[in-house]
Image (spheres, helix red, strand yellow):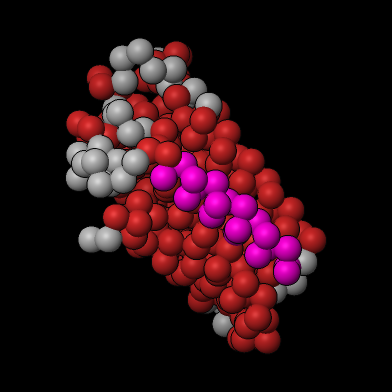
Amino acid sequence: MNRFLQLFRLGNCVMGIVGLLVAAFIASGTNMPDSWFQLLVASISVAGFIAAGNALNDYVDREVDRLAHPDRPLPSGRMEPRTALYVASGLFVSSLAISLLLDPISIAIFVIATVMMLAYELKLKASGLAGNATIALLTGGLFLLGGAVVGSVENTLAVAGMAMLVSLGREITKDIEDMEGDQGRNTLPMRIGKKNAGIIAAVFFISGPILSLQPAIDGIFGVAYLPLVLVADAIFLYDSWLLFQDPRRAQKLAKLGMLVALVAFIAGGFR
């Protein structure tokens, strides 16, 4: 594979664009094509932002990747570290510059996301809960961006909030699963213990389903939304119990719940 495409993780960039378009559909339904130019601009900016984050990640983790990912461009010697750093810097600046073609809310989301990504890679990644929260906020921020681009950010507040809460629960659960290999790291389970961290993760898994009911109460989405999102909610509630028994299985099951929830929000977009 081309060293730059491998550095950017092209698959992640594509998934980011898909997430943006799904969020836009959730927000505006079948009126989404009316915002085709804004969506094109946002898609380019999102792809550049994700590529920049991946390039910076490879630069920061270049020593760790000698063992964990020796085939990547930097540890394999196919790219100089400074090249990855220059590329990451250029992409961050370019994605922000392109986003200036969008509305003020979308621009603000891009600026905040860029600051958070830089903080995560340079400082927060190894700081436990703060790093987990940053990833969760970035996940939810993509849905807010999709809504902002089509001028209906209020319609994505619930899905963004649910994504943030469930992602945070999953990140903590992953840290519980990895406790044996995380000696010396400042993760939440290492600081307060497996049981206490599990209780906090369970709270987030339970909070997400509660928030997911708001669109049904407000009548924002179509009739297909509620029965589907209840299935996702059941998965997350089960996760809040399972993580104490089998954290590995719980965090994998959470991915399924997130997929079902996404389907529910898409179905609700047909209104």
| Quarter of the figure with residue 177 | top left
Q: Residue at x 61, y 68 (%)?
A: 42
Q: Residue at x 58, y 63 (%)?
A: 45
- Locate residue 140 relative to residue 62 in the image: left or right: right
Give coordinates of residue 31: x percent, y percent: 66, 85
Q: Which residues are magenta?
A: 83-102
- Locate residue 139 relative to residue 78 in the image: left or right: right
Asked if residue 163 can be seen in this view, the reply is no
Q: Residue at x 51, y 76 (%)?
A: 267
Comparing 27 with 45, the one in front is 45
User: Taking 263 as reference, is 254 above or below it?
Assistant: above
Residue 91: say if magenta: yes
User: Taking 170 as reference, is 229 above or below it?
Assistant: below
- Locate residue 253 relative to residue 43 in the image: left or right: left
Comparing 60 with 249, the one in front is 60
Give coordinates of residue 126: x percent, y percent: 45, 24
Q: Residue at x 65, y 81 (%)?
A: 37
Give coordinates of residue 13: x percent, y percent: 43, 61
Comparing 5 with 265, the one in front is 5
| Quarter of the figure with residue 3 | bottom left
Query: Which secondary structure dominates the residues rendered in magenta?
Result: helix
Residue 171: say if magenta: no
Give coordinates of residue 228: x percent, y percent: 46, 68
Looking at the image, how many numbered discs can be counted on the residues? Answer: 0
| Quarter of the figure with residue 192 | top left
Q: Quarter of the image containing the C terminus? A: bottom right
- Locate residue 206 relative to residue 68 in the image: left or right: right
Comparing 255 with 219, the one in front is 255
Asked if residue 39 can be seen in this view, the reply is yes
Q: Quarter of the image containing the N terminus? A: bottom left
